[in-house]
């Protein structure tokens, strides 16, 4: 069973709260072939194959075409207890444990289910996506002592 990647400000039971401030961009990507016939005429074919059942971005689990992509931009500002630095380091360690884009894992979209209701076993399919990191490079930026900015893109994969 793949690991579960958790982001959020409210934590599920058993996980400490995360002082991360983040933005999440959810995109769906289609693969279309366009043959230009000239004079404005064109032939279009969608090359995606419907697969699933999987989360659809609306809180349902269905089969559909397209690949989901998530972009996460996080800002971690250290508080007195330095918990933001711990959260930034956990994010970094999770990336390293997946060997960059090598290993797939489950990501629960906070837009489809509350972050305090994440299934850490990965069994519940509502809002769950099987993804991998899109790139083999992760950068984090340290501005001032314990102020981090970082971002990463996740791309959906088939099991």
Image (cartoon, helix red, strand yellow):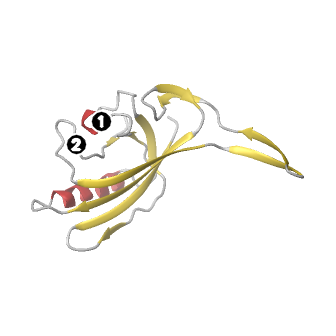
Question: Which residue shows up at 62% across the image and 42% down it?
Answer: 30
Q: Is residue 35 above or below residue 129?
A: below
Determine whether label 2 and label 1 are within 8 Å by CB.
Answer: yes
Toward the front, the furthest residue is: 40
Q: Quick one: which residue is furthest to the left in this view?
A: 80
Q: Residue at x 43, y 43 (%)?
A: 104
| Residue 59 location (% of width, % of height) | 42, 29
Residue 73 appears left or right of 20: right
Horizontal and vertical percent position of residue 46: 71, 38
Which numbered tag is attached to residue 114? 1
Q: Secondary structure at mark 1?
A: loop
Who's the residue at 38% across and 65% down the image? 139
Question: How many residues crowd mark 1 within 10 Å: few (<14), some (14–19), many (20+)?
Answer: some
As drawn, is 93 to the left or to the right of 98? left
Q: Quadrant of residue 14?
A: top left
Closer to the chain start, of discs 2 and 1, is 2
Front-most of 141 and 39? Answer: 39
**Left or right: 102, with 141 as reference point:** right
On screen, 73 above or below 10? Answer: below
Q: Where in the figure is residue 36, as x and y percent of width and height? A: 84, 50
Which label number is shown at residue 10? Answer: 2
Side of 138 where 36 appears, left or right: right
Camera-side residue: 104 or 69? Answer: 69
Above-or-below relation of 28 to 126 = below
Which secondary structure lies at badge 2? loop
Residue 144 is labelled as none
């Amino acid at each position: 069973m793949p690991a579960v990647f958790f982001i959020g400000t409210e934590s599920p039971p058993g996980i400490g709260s995360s002082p991360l401030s983040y933005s999440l961009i959810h995109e769906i990507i289609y693969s279309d072939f366009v043959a230009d016939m000239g004079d404005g005429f064109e032939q279009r074919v969608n090359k995606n194959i419907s697969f699933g059942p999987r989360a659809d971005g609306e809180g349902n689990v269905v089969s559909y075409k397209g690949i989901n992509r998530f972009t996460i931009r996080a800002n971690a500002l250290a508080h007195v207890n330095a918990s933001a630095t711990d959260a930034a380091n956990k994010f970094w360690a999770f990336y390293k444990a997946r060997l960059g884009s090598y290993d797939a894992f489950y990501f629960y979209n906070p837009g489809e289910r509350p972050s305090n209701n994440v299934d850490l076993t990965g069994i519940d399919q509502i809002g769950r996506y099987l993804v991998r990191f899109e790139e083999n490079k992760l950068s984090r930026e340290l501005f001032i002592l314990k102020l981090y900015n970082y971002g990463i893109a996740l791309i959906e994969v088939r099991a």
